[in-house]
């Protein structure tokens, strides 16, 4: 299975995910990204800096598979198109 890395970009700062997670496909990576953001917003609270953050999901080769704005995770899943 492919490995995906969930890196958080807040402004110009990048918090790298050094371990990653093996997932079946990009759709599953999208689901995991959304769940991660929702959990972070739940534990840290809705802060302006986090609302402007983006989760950059990359593959084993460092290519960005998807960019998931934190604000998008707050939308109902039926309103969102997977990337």
Image: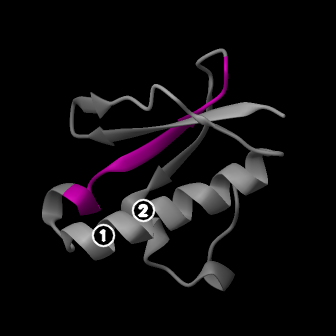
- Report, in whole angstroms, how far the alpha carbon at label 1 lies from the one at label 2: 6 Å
Q: In this view, does 76 lie above or below 8?
A: below
**Residue 16 versus residue 54 in the image, above or below:** above
Residue that numbered label 2 is attached to = 37
Which residue is painted at 52% across and 29% down in the image? 19
| Residue matched to label 1 | 41
> Taking 74 as reference, is 83 left or right?
right
- The picture places residue 55, in percent across and down from the top left corner, at 44, 46
Looking at the picture, how far across and down is residue 31, in whole percent? 65, 62
How crowded pointer 2 is (Cα within 10 Å; few <14, some 14-19, many 20+) is rated as: many
**Residue 71 shows in the view:** no
The answer to whether residue 56 is magenta is: yes
Secondary structure under tag 2 reads helix
Q: Is mark 1 on a helix, strand or loop?
A: helix
Residue drawn at (68%, 84%), measured in percent from left and top?
Answer: 78
Inspect the magenta stretch and tell me whether residue 59 lies in it. Answer: yes
Q: Do the residues labelled 1 and 2 touch (CB within 8 Å)?
A: yes
What is the span of residues highlighted in magenta in the rendered image? Answer: 50-60
């Amino acid at each position: 299975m492919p490995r995906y890395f969930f890196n958080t970009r807040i402004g110009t700062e990048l918090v790298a995910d050094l371990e990653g997670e093996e997932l079946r496909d990009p759709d599953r990576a999208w689901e995991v990204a959304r769940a991660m953001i929702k959990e972070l917003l739940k534990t840290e609270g809705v802060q302006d800096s986090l609302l402007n953050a983006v989760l950059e999901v990359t593959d084993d080769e460092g290519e960005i598979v998807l960019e998931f704005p934190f604000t998008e995770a707050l939308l109902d899943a039926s309103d969102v198109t997977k990337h």
